[in-house]
């Protein structure tokens, strides 16, 4: 069956450390994968998109990797800050159905 | 430039009733997708509208229907509401370019079914 899984429901990190979130998928062949941030009671906000032919993409303190062999994407936040505390969602395109599938998210907490 | 707007922000209905949720896409966007997000879960794709037609549909029953107007705004209708329909309903707009759908989400409508 098709699945998209994020490594844990919650992750607690000390301020200043690097937070690493994992997204694994099964039985999809996405052309790209996206990461979103969602704060409580708000809609998701797009952060980064990485295509299947890209290994890594960076944006300020954010870095995303995409390994189509392992069927995995890693999302890194370096020099984490309490303001980075939120739920982070990965999403991939189900090209066979032309729709975007979301994982259930990882709730990240950065403690001062 | 206004982003994606949704109305209403909150709604309380009783079982069996019908509800209509509204979405105005980001300026310049032609595609609207609707998602249902239960507490603690990721958004689940309901359907997508493009050029006033339903282009794709997720695993939702026919009680869920929609519409897109010539100005690209969209409605989500849910008939015969069930308790399990209680969720945050998200609208996302995009411009389908090169097959990549970078989506911009609205703040959502919180629907409670009693």
Image: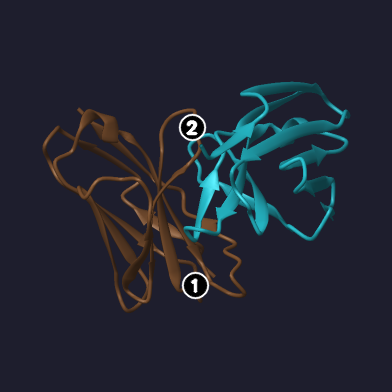
For label 1, the residue is B29
Which chain is brown in the rendering? B
Q: Quadrant of residue A75 in the image?
A: top right
On screen, residue A100 versus residue B69, left or right, reads right
- Whether B25 is drawn above or below A33: the answer is below
Camera-side residue of A35 and A16: A35
Q: Is residue A112 visible?
A: no
For label 2, the residue is B41
Residue A35 in the image, given as x and y percentages of width and height: 66, 47
The local crowd at label 2, few if under 14, some if 14 to 19, many if 20 or more residues have their Cα within 10 Å, is some
- Give me the chain letter of mark 2: B
Q: Residue at x 32, y 79 (%)?
A: B70
Give the colouring mode of the picture: by chain
Camera-side residue of A15 and A50: A50
Kindly state the secondary structure of the residue where label 1 is placed.
Answer: loop
On screen, residue B6 versus residue B113, left or right, reads right
- Whether A90 is drawn above or below A18: the answer is below
Kindly state the secondary structure of the residue where label 2 is placed.
Answer: loop
Camera-side residue of B29 and A56: A56
- Give me the chain letter of mark 1: B
On screen, residue A13 versus residue B54, left or right, reads right
Q: Are marks 2 and 1 on the same chain?
A: yes
Question: In the rendered image of this protein, which colour is used for chain A?
Answer: cyan
- Whether B26 is drawn above or below A89: the answer is below
Camera-side residue of B97 and A30: A30
Q: Is residue B22 visible?
A: yes
Which of pointers 2 and 1 lies earlier in the amino acid sequence? 1
On screen, residue A100 versus residue A30, left or right, reads left
The local crowd at label 1, few if under 14, some if 14 to 19, many if 20 or more residues have their Cα within 10 Å, is many
Q: Residue at x 51, y 37 (%)?
A: A1
Q: Quadrant of residue A8 in the image?
A: top right
């Amino acid at each position: 069956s098709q699945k998209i899984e994020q490594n844990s429901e919650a992750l607690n990190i000390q301020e200043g450390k690097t937070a690493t979130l994992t997204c694994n998928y099964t039985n999809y062949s996405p052309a790209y994968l996206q990461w979103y941030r969602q704060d409580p009671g708000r809609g998701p906000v797009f952060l980064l998109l990485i295509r299947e032919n890209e290994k890594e993409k960076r944006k300020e303190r954010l870095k995303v990797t995409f390994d189509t062999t392992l069927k995995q994407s890693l999302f890194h936040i370096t020099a984490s800050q309490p303001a980075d505390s939120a739920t982070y969602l990965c999403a991939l395109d189900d090209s066979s159905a032309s729709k975007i599938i979301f994982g259930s998210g990882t709730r990240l907490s950065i403690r001062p | 430039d206004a982003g994606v707007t949704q109305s209403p922000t909150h709604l309380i209905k009783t079982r069996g009733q019908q509800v209509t949720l509204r979405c105005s896409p980001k300026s310049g966007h032609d595609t609207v997708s609707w998602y249902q997000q239960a507490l603690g879960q990721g958004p689940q794709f309901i359907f997508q509208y493009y050029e006033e037609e339903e282009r794709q549909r997720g695993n939702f029953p026919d009680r869920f229907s929609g519409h897109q107007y010539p100005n690209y705004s969209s409605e989500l209708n849910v008939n015969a509401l069930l308790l399990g329909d209680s969720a945050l309903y998200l609208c996302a707009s995009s411009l389908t370019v090169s097959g990549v759908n970078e989506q911009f989400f609205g703040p959502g409508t919180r629907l409670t079914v009693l």
